[in-house]
Image (cartoon, rainbow, N blue to C red):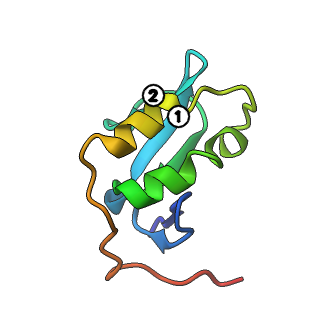
Amino acid sequence: MTIRTCLGCRARTEPALLVRIVGAGGAAVVDLDRRLPGRGAWVHPTQQCAERAVRAIPRALRDKHLDTSPIARWAQDGLAPSPDRRNEHPMDN
């Protein structure tokens, strides 16, 4: 079973509960179809997780000059305020 970590809250969960973010054309974009090429970062589709992830996206995607404003706008355009964490597992660090 594949497990991914949310970049916003650091909770580990199934990819089906997360949204993939990739760098495309110098900007971070939401990859709803999970088909865009390149390195991806994962985040819960909630306002809280997306807002927290904005600062970490350039490092996660290994592009320190990446424009994250599309993700910030996406976070403010009606995402749910908090994640449903029933199917998540704590970090094993």
Whether residue 44 is visible: no
Residue in view at x 45 percent, y 28 percent = 36
Q: Amino acid at mark 2?
A: Leu
Determine the residue located farthest toward the front in the rendered image. 76
Mark 1 and mark 2 in contact? Answer it, CB < 8 Å: yes
Q: Is residue 75 above or below residue 29?
A: below
Residue in view at x 47 percent, y 65 percent = 2
Residue 91 as seen in the image, left or right of residue 71: right
Dot 2: within a 10 Å radius of its alpha carbon, few (fewer than 14), some, or many (20 or more) residues?
some
Residue in view at x 40 percent, y 32 percent = 35
* Residue identified by numbered label 2: 36
As helix, strand or loop, the secondary structure at mark 2 comes to loop
Residue 72 as seen in the image, left or right of residue 23: left
- Quadrant containing the N terminus in the rendered view: bottom left
Residue in view at x 72 percent, y 26 percent = 65
As helix, strand or loop, the secondary structure at mark 1 comes to strand
Q: Amino acid at mark 1?
A: Val
Determine the residue located farthest toward the top in the rendered image. 25
* Residue identified by numbered label 1: 22
Disc sitting over residue 80 in the figure: none
Residue nearest the observer in this picture, 3 or 23: 23
Where, by quadrant of the figure, is residue 5 drawn?
A: bottom right
**Going from the N terminus, do you reach mark 1 or mark 2 first?**
1
- Quadrant containing the C terminus in the rendered view: bottom right
Residue 74 as seen in the image, left or right of residue 10: left
